[in-house]
Image: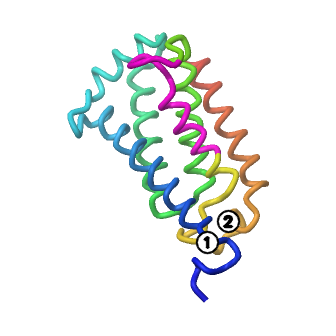
Amino acid sequence: MSRWSDENGGLDFGLLALRLLVAVVMGAHGLMQVFGLFGGPGMAKFGSLLQGYGFTRNIEFLTWLTGVTEVAGSALLVIGLFTPLAAAGLLGVGISAVRAKWAGGFSDGAGFELELTLTVIAFALLLTGPGWYALDRHTAWRRKPLGFAIGGIILAAGGAVAVASLF
């Protein structure tokens, strides 16, 4: 019996599509901001951008933390490995990004609508698990993701609070 015809229908393909979407967008963003790939700003300019959003301390560490979290979390989501941890990391980055851009509201350029969308996708993946098309398919967090999701939500919220407090 194929995965398409079982009781989940297209659910697993939908979860794969969401994992790939958020991984490509956030992973590319991390590579742009830290390494300057794809025409990105690189560390120095990203640090200046973070200062513009009100972050004042440990900017270099924050740029590395953000970039590495985005790249590593995205790489894990692409293959569907340690999905709760990867989704929690991207959720924490997303919460911090929405908070930083909150004053811009929903507007061109300065708004937070893209960050909110990516954050909600990471949250949804945390709640649902990776789906069948993942290396995590035989793990407890794929079969019963809610308990792991609660831990991930606590981790993401704690990370966002730490970023707001320490930087």
Is residue 23 shown in magenta? no
* Left or right: where 141 falls relative to 50: right
Q: Main secondary structure of the magenta part?
A: helix
Residue shown at the point (63%, 53%) measured from the top left: 84
Q: Looking at the image, is 85 positioned above or below residue 63?
A: below
Specify the segment rendered in magenta: 106-123
Badge 1 vs badge 2, beta-carbon distance below 8 Å? yes
Callout 2, which amino acid? Arg
Q: Quadrant of residue 35?
A: top left
* Residue 84's disc number: none
Name the residue that disc number 2 marks. Answer: 142
Q: Quadrant of residue 140?
A: bottom right
Residue shown at the point (24%, 34%) measured from the top left: 36
First in sequence: mark 1 vs mark 2: 1
Q: CA distance from mark 1 to mark 2?
A: 6 Å
Q: Quadrant of residue 75?
A: bottom left
Callout 1, which amino acid? Arg
**Furthest-bottom residue in view?**
1
Name the residue that disc number 1 marks. Answer: 137
Q: Looking at the image, is 157 positioned above or below residue 4?
A: above
